[in-house]
Image (tube, rainbow, N blue to C red):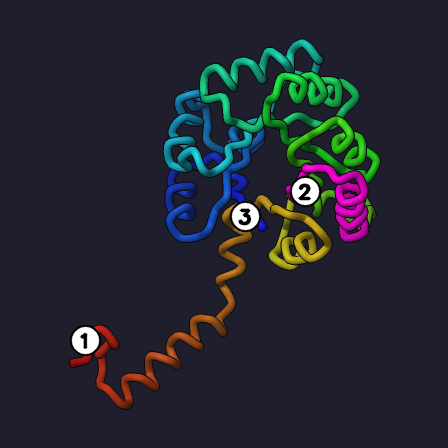
């Protein structure tokens, strides 16, 4: 199971990489927009420095034509590093790009997936990750639980190495559902992570444990201070 951050914010990435078992960072043009007019390649290099070589970095092409997407991919790999996962929307042109990149041995994340058929085509094209848009599917009256489950079955059926990187969430319940239905990975904004730890019961449980301990051993006394 892989948990990724869907952000391009340097401070957020620094913070959560230290706190949580983060497997990587994903971004797209809309996420980059939130950071303003940045020095794009240097910004992404900073993210790579924070992540290190062991975590994955996913960067999306912007062009829409076959030739343009390939040029974007080339620029990303040249100006960031060769381990970047190139995010390519699963359109007709995008599928052609995915096939070409995989023939060159390049890491690929197939994104903007709304349907099982898109996913099946991306799996057949050899994408390393497929990114179904969970909440957006739900908003279109597409059952994301069923869709992710069938994608997982297709991967198993074909002995594919493709992983499902579920994306586009509005709450923690959707993340849980995606993973429980077969997604091997999930990428989410920090708002989702904050939701997960905002439950008052967690804070109350910690306070109760501290209070019970201090009743016996005294205020401010911890296990490490016992003699």
**Residue at (50, 48) in percent of width and height:** 190
Q: Are marks 2 and 1 in contact (CB under 8 Å)?
A: no
Q: Position of residue 178 (x, y in %)?
A: 69, 52
Provide the residue span drawn in magenta.
145-166
**Residue at (50, 26) in percent of width and height:** 83
Q: Around disc 3, counting alpha carbons within 10 Å, would you say few (fewer than 14), some (14 to 19), or many (20 or more)?
A: some
Give the labeled residue for mark 3: 3
Q: Which mark is residue 225?
A: 1
Q: Is residue 51 magenta?
A: no
Above or below, comparing residue 123 to residue 225 in the picture: above
Q: Position of residue 9 (x, y in %)?
A: 44, 37
In three-dimensional space, the C-alpha distance between marks 2 and 1, rounded to whole angstroms, equals 47 Å
Q: Around disc 2, counting alpha carbons within 10 Å, would you say few (fewer than 14), some (14 to 19), or many (20 or more)?
A: many
Q: Are marks 1 and 3 in contact (CB under 8 Å)?
A: no
Is residue 122 left or right of 78 when viewed as pictured?
right
Secondary structure found at label 2 = strand
């Amino acid at each position: 199971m892989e948990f990724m951050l869907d952000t391009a914010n340097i401070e957020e990435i620094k913070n959560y990489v230290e706190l949580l078992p983060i497997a990587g960072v994903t971004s797209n043009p809309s996420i980059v927009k939130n950071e303003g007019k940045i020095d794009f390649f240097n910004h992404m290099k900073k993210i790579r420095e924070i992540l290190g070589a062991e975590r994955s970095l996913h960067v999306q092409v912007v062009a829409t034509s076959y030739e343009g997407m390939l040029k974007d991919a080339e620029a990303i790999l040249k100006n960031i590093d060769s381990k970047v996962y190139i995010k390519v929307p699963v359109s007709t042109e995008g599928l052609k790009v995915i096939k070409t990149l995989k023939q060159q041995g390049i890491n690929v994340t197939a994104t903007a997936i709304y349907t099982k058929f898109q996913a099946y085509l991306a799996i057949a094209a050899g994408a390393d990750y497929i990114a179904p848009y969970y909440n957006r599917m739900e908003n279109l009256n597409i059952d994301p639980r069923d869709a992710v489950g069938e994608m997982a079955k297709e991967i198993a059926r074909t002995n594919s190495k493709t992983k499902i990187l579920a994306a586009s969430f509005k709450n923690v319940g959707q993340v849980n559902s995606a993973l429980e239905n077969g997604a091997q990975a999930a990428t989410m904004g920090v708002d989702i992570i904050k939701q997960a730890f905002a439950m008052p019961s967690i804070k109350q449980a910690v306070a109760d444990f501290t209070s019970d301990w201090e009743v016996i051993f005294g205020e401010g006394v911890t296990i490490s201070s016992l003699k």
